[in-house]
């Protein structure tokens, strides 16, 4: 059984919602919808690297906050509500120089007013490069 709204697809996640955003410009693209997780990738390139040649910590945070915020928005029962980030943290464990990183988001807590999301970012060899946690608050419709 899925925790996401009915019929959620990767195509819907990559549609206009991200277009024109920072995440879109950095190349964040959703790749998978699982029963209790979402996956997205981001290239490690001249737009996401720091001067030392490894992925920028801020790029990791953009990926983590994007996938976690979208997860809050598509959580079943949350249609029509607004979601805002309250806190994001990231532990950068491994520098990645090229290729793509893949983020997987899973819920830790999905209450009516707050959600807490666990985000694991891995390199192409499946090694964890960053662990992040995002806290999101749910607000009523405008």
Image (tube, rainbow, N blue to C red):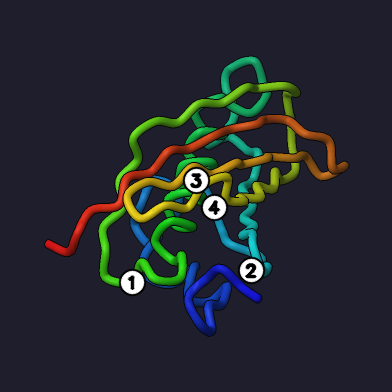
Residue beneath the point at 35% across and 55% down: 112
Residue beneath the point at 26% across and 57% down: 82
Residue beneath the point at 50% across and 82% down: 6
Q: Nearer the viewer, residue 101 or 49?
A: 101
CB atoms of marks 2 and 4 within 8 Å? no
> Can residue 7 be seen here?
yes
Secondary-structure class at tag 4: loop
Residue beneath the point at 46% across and 42% down: 65
Q: Is residue 135 left or right of residue 67?
A: left
Secondary-structure class at tag 2: strand
Distance from disc 1 to disc 3, alpha carbons, whole Å, reads 27 Å
Q: Is residue 7 left or right of residue 86?
A: right
Q: Position of residue 128 (x, y in %)?
A: 77, 34
Point out the tag, 2 or 1, that comes first from the N-terminus.
2
Distance from disc 3 to disc 4, alpha carbons, whole Å, reads 6 Å
Q: Quadrant of the C terminus?
A: bottom left
CB atoms of marks 3 and 4 within 8 Å? yes
**Residue topped by disc 4:** 28
**Residue topped by disc 1:** 79
**Residue topped by disc 3:** 26
Q: Give the class, few, some or many, for how many residues have Cα within 10 Å of label 1's Cα (few <14, many ≥20).
A: few
Q: Quadrant of the N terminus?
A: bottom right
Q: Nearer the viewer, residue 63 or 135?
A: 135
Q: Nearer the viewer, residue 123 or 104?
A: 104
Point out the tag, 1 or 4, that comes first from the N-terminus.
4
Distance from disc 1 to disc 4, alpha carbons, whole Å, reads 23 Å
**Residue topped by disc 2:** 33
* Mark 3 vs mark 2: in front: 2
Residue sitting at the far right: 125
């Amino acid at each position: 059984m899925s925790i996401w709204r009915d019929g959620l697809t990767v195509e819907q996640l990559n549609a206009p919602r991200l277009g024109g955003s920072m995440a879109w410009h950095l190349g964040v693209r959703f790749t998978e919808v699982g029963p209790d997780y979402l996956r997205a990738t981001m290239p490690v390139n001249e737009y996401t690297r720091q001067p030392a040649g490894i992925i920028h910590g801020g790029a990791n945070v953009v990926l983590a906050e994007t996938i976690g915020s979208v997860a809050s928005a598509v959580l079943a029962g949350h249609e029509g509500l607004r979601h805002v980030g309250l806190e994001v943290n990231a532990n950068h464990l491994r520098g990645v120089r090229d290729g793509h990183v893949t983020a997987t988001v899973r819920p830790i807590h999905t209450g009516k007013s707050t959600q807490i999301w666990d985000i694991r970012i891995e390199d192409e060899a499946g090694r964890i490069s960053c662990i992040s946690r995002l806290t999101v608050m749910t607000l009523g419709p405008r």
